[in-house]
Amino acid sequence: MRYQGTVYRPPSEAGSLLIQATLGCPHNQCRFCSMYKGVPFRIRLLKDILEDLDLALDRYGPRVRTLFLPDGNTIVMKTSSLVPILEHARRNFPGLERVTVYGSARFINRKDAAELKDLAEAGLGRVHMGLESGDDPTLALMKKGATAAESIAAGQKIRAAGLELSAYYLVGLGGRTRFREHARASARALNEMAPEFIRLRTYYPTEGAPLFEDMSAGRFEIPGPYEALEELRLLVSGLRAETMVLSDHISNYLNISGRIPRDREDMLAEIDAAMNMEAERFERTLYHL
Ligand code: SF4
């Protein structure tokens, strides 16, 4: 199989066939992100992508169940290119249950409702969207490329088209000075988007990200573990939409997952228990970090 660069895909796509449709990220400006820095963005030739689907058929047979199309923001591709890819995938793998892509609000909003419906009809099932924050000052500082209102509009468009929305929230992105506002505003945005999934990630600095430089220079401080838990508590207590919260990432201090509203009180109790744990015991629970 042909694959260029580092593989980035959601943990839920760990068992999926990965067929690269784009290389890099067409935005590539988020200050916290180092994933594609230095990688020039490019959309692969349609014929190469279709050829890869045929190579995958030869190699794995027709029983592929899930497919993810990296890299960052494959939703940016023209609908007239994505549809034949989705159709070809369905022809090669008749039992395909799920096809997903990454898509930021900035690029989702370039598509109209009819285009998103076409994608859903052609077999796209879910968009993994990095909301990161619903707090405008945080979004602007991090150069996310979308305001909270634009992110909400994008999320609502995805859902209205019949696609599943998997929204990512980045614990700590507001820094020590703004983590409470970041949590509250994000809960409000997520309530309006009502994604099927909210996936929690805790920010940790990675070399190559501009925010890493800010942290090294003392211009940005990430919340400590207890502050991160307080942030998480604010987020979870503010969620009203029916959704599934998943902590499917090693970066998180606490592995809390559950369905909102059903499990909210249990989740809050779990967070409270962690917040009340004495430091030494709590640190022992963080062996994975
Ligand atoms: S977070 Fe996503 S949109 Fe932002 S630069 Fe990284 S890959 Fe691109």
Image (cartoon, rainbow, N blue to C red):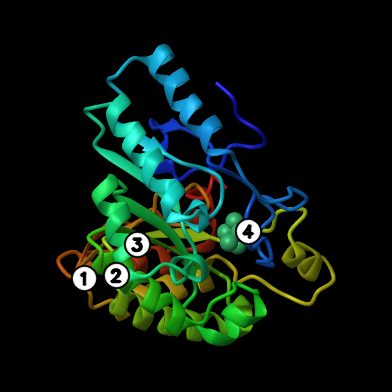
| Label 4 sits on residue | 26
Q: Which mark is residue 115?
A: 3
- Amino acid type indicated by mark 2: Leu
Q: Earlier in the sequence, mark 4 or mark 3?
A: 4
- Quarter placement of the N terminus: top right
> Looking at the image, is mark 4 or mark 3 nearer the viewer?
3
Q: Nearer the viewer, residue 24 or 142?
A: 24
Q: Earlier in the sequence, mark 2 or mark 3?
A: 3
Total numbered badges shown on the rendered structure: 4
Q: Position of residue 100 (x, y in %)?
A: 37, 46
Q: Nearer the viewer, residue 86 or 156?
A: 86
Looking at the image, residue 275 lies above or below residue 136: above
| Label 1 sits on residue | 265
Q: Earlier in the sequence, mark 1 or mark 3?
A: 3
Q: Earlier in the sequence, mark 2 or mark 4?
A: 4
For this view, does 130 lie left or right of residue 222? left
The residue positioned 77% from the left and 54% from the top of the image is 208
Quadrant of picture, ligand 1 = bottom right
Q: Is residue 113 visible?
A: yes
Callout 3 environment at 10 Å: few (<14), some (14 to 19), or many (20+)? some
- Amino acid type indicated by mark 3: Glu
> Looking at the image, is mark 2 or mark 3 nearer the viewer?
3
Looking at the image, residue 29 lies above or below residue 83: below
Instruction: Check if mark 4's residue and mark 3's residue have beta carbons within 8 Å.
Output: no
- Amino acid type indicated by mark 4: Pro
Q: Position of residue 111 (x, y in %)?
A: 42, 67
Under circle 3, the secondary element is helix
For this view, does 115 lie left or right of residue 140? left
